[in-house]
């Protein structure tokens, strides 16, 4: 059953139709892709973080290695972990702007 939609003054009334099953399937597919990407990136970041924590817990002597004056391997790995987080965030933003937003616009 169609219902009228108010399109504003002077506009012809439009009607909404039944929900298109193909459109619903596309929306669910977009949601699954976004969730999959989020889980992959979260797993990568947590793996990097857990690796560093395990090094701190079980290999302190390795982390104490001096790379240069005042810079140990622990500091370099810690800074690298932060950079990995930034890069993963940047990757997600680029992916969302190109793949995700394009798919959402296609559905609208």
Image (cartoon, rainbow, N blue to C red):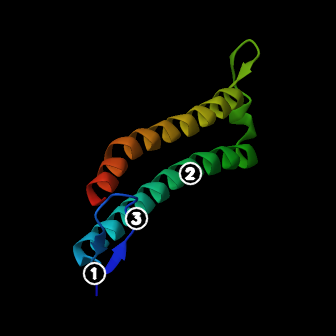
Horizontal arrangement in the rendering, residue 84 relative to residue 25 (left or right): right
Q: Residue at x 29, y 82 (%)?
A: 2
- Depth order, front residue of 62/75: 75
Graded by Cα atoms within 10 Å as few (under 14), some (14 to 19) or many (20 or more), the crowding at tag 3 reads some
Graded by Cα atoms within 10 Å as few (under 14), some (14 to 19) or many (20 or more), the crowding at tag 2 reads few
Mark nearer the N terminus (1 vs 3): 1
Q: Is residue 13 above or below residue 102?
A: below
Q: Which label is found at residue 31?
A: 3
Q: Are marks 1 and 2 in contact (CB under 8 Å)?
A: no
Horizontal arrangement in the rendering, residue 61 relative to residue 108 (left or right): right
Residue that label 1 marks: 18
Q: Quadrant of the C terminus?
A: bottom left
Q: Residue at x 77, y 15 (%)?
A: 70
- Depth order, front residue of 30/76: 30
Q: CA distance from mark 1 to mark 3?
A: 21 Å
- Location of residue 71 (image quadrant): top right
Q: CA distance from mark 1 to mark 2?
A: 45 Å
Residue that label 2 marks: 47
Of helix, strand and loop, which one carries label 3?
helix
Graded by Cα atoms within 10 Å as few (under 14), some (14 to 19) or many (20 or more), the crowding at tag 1 reads few
Q: Residue at x 26, y 55 (%)?
A: 106
């Amino acid at each position: 059953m169609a219902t009228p939609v108010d399109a504003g003054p002077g506009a012809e009334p439009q009607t909404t139709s039944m929900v298109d099953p193909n459109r619903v399937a596309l929306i669910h597919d977009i949601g699954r892709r976004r969730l999959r990407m989020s889980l992959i990136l979260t797993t990568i970041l947590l793996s990097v973080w857990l690796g560093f924590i395990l090094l701190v817990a079980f290999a302190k002597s390795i982390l104490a290695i001096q790379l240069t004056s005042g810079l140990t391997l622990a500091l370099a790995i810690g800074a690298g972990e932060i950079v990995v987080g930034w890069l993963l965030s940047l990757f997600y933003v680029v992916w969302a702007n190109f793949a995700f937003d394009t798919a959402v616009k296609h559905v609208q």
